[in-house]
Amino acid sequence: MNVVQAWQEPLRLDEAYRAIAAILRRMDQIQASCAEGFPLYCTGADSHWKVSAGGSWLGGFWSGLWWLRAHRSAFQGDRLQARLITERLRDKLESATHHRSLIFHYGAGLGSCLLDDHRANELAEQAAQQLARAFDPLLGCIALGRDMGGGEEGDLRLSIDPLAATLQLFARRADPRLLSLGRQQLQASFRACAGDGGAWSSLACHENGQWRAGDRPGNWSRGQAWALLGLSVGARLYGAPYRQDAERACEYWLRSRGLAAPLNRLSEPRGPDDPCAAAMASLALQGLATQVPDGEVLHQQAGAQLATIIRSGDFHEGRFVGHCYRVSAAGEQKVESACGSFFLLAALLAWTGELDPGVI
């Protein structure tokens, strides 16, 4: 596999441990600020958190942060907190959106696979069955759906964002029927969103019996990072040729973004960057590194991506203001979010060897 060589020194372990400790301290501050609500985003150190009673699609990441913390600490209080947050997600089970995968893999599936928590097991299983029922045999996939921004055409759209989470939920019990549905979701994603040279679109629309890409392949960095995560999981579950496709997507990422914080969209060179996408890419690179012969190169690239984040001004005292997010009709800006902090913490724990990147 030919990849761009790392010029940035990979993150040192002492830096990683300090960053992990800072994120865990920050979680306590966020919890005190948001109480029973779900933290969505915060625009800066002096700003208040935007809080949601139901969590929207971000709720599972707040729960997931606590499952990661409980996995690391083995402290019963952390596990109880994760359970309490997870239970508040239950009313999203029947939401008409494929984003349920994001909510319930990160929000319950992690508690199931990391800690074998019985309540998380139950909720993750219910989510997998609900997703299976949402599979459309005519489209050959689970459509985005109309809730959480899918709109009236959501039943004819496919989003790449939930791919990794869907594959994980369908694989959790090694049920042949669910594994088959996961493979079909992966294949449909290829038909709909795969571009040339490893670039991926984030969204596709089904029109006149065919899929049409909804955006330029590879342009949106976080969309490409979602694809990397999905392909890494798909390669682990289904092997070749998906492993080669995952390698091509990683090559494209490194060729088009390198090791700097990537632009939110390549077509907007004066727009904001999105370090959250780099954290996701680092996690995907670490997951794929365990599957390919020259994986150490990918592993070092992942560590260099983390170093760029931790040594930047986007990360300070556990705050990761690195998720490019639409906060108003006026446009997107970098914010601190449960999603960004989750992926950074997961990538750091994988880097220190405390977490198997394959579970994410």
Image (cartoon, helix red, strand yellow):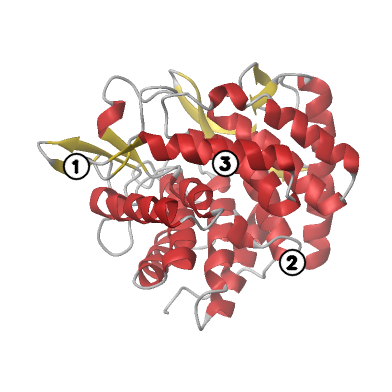
Judge whether 295 appears above or below 184 on screen: below
Q: Nearer the viewer, residue 169 or 70?
A: 169
Q: Nearer the viewer, residue 182 or 31?
A: 182
Residue bearing mark 1: 212
Judge whether 272 appears above or below 110 on screen: above
Secondary structure of residue under mark 3? helix
Q: Position of residue 335 (x, y in %)?
A: 61, 32
| Residue 339 can be seen, yes or no | no
Q: Residues within 10 Å of mark 1 (few under 14, many from 20)?
A: some
The residue that appears at 33% across and 44% down in the rendered structure is: 267
Residue bearing mark 3: 125
Which sits earlier in the primary sequence, circle 3 or circle 1? 3
Q: Position of residue 136 (x, y in %)?
A: 29, 38
Q: Which residue is the extreme one toward the bottom? A: 293
Secondary structure of residue under mark 1? strand
Q: Closer to the observer: label 3 or label 1?
A: 3
Q: Residues within 10 Å of mark 3 (few under 14, many from 20)?
A: many
Could you tell me how far apart the alpha carbons at marks 3 and 1 are, in whole angstroms? 32 Å
Q: Position of residue 129 (x, y in %)?
A: 48, 38
Residue bearing mark 2: 353
Which sits earlier in the primary sequence, circle 3 or circle 2? 3
Which sits earlier in the primary sequence, circle 1 or circle 2? 1
Could you tell me how far apart the alpha carbons at marks 3 and 2 are, in whole angstroms? 28 Å
The residue that appears at 89% across and 37% down in the rendered structure is: 77
The residue that appears at 81% across and 33% down in the rendered structure is: 81
Secondary structure of residue under mark 2? loop
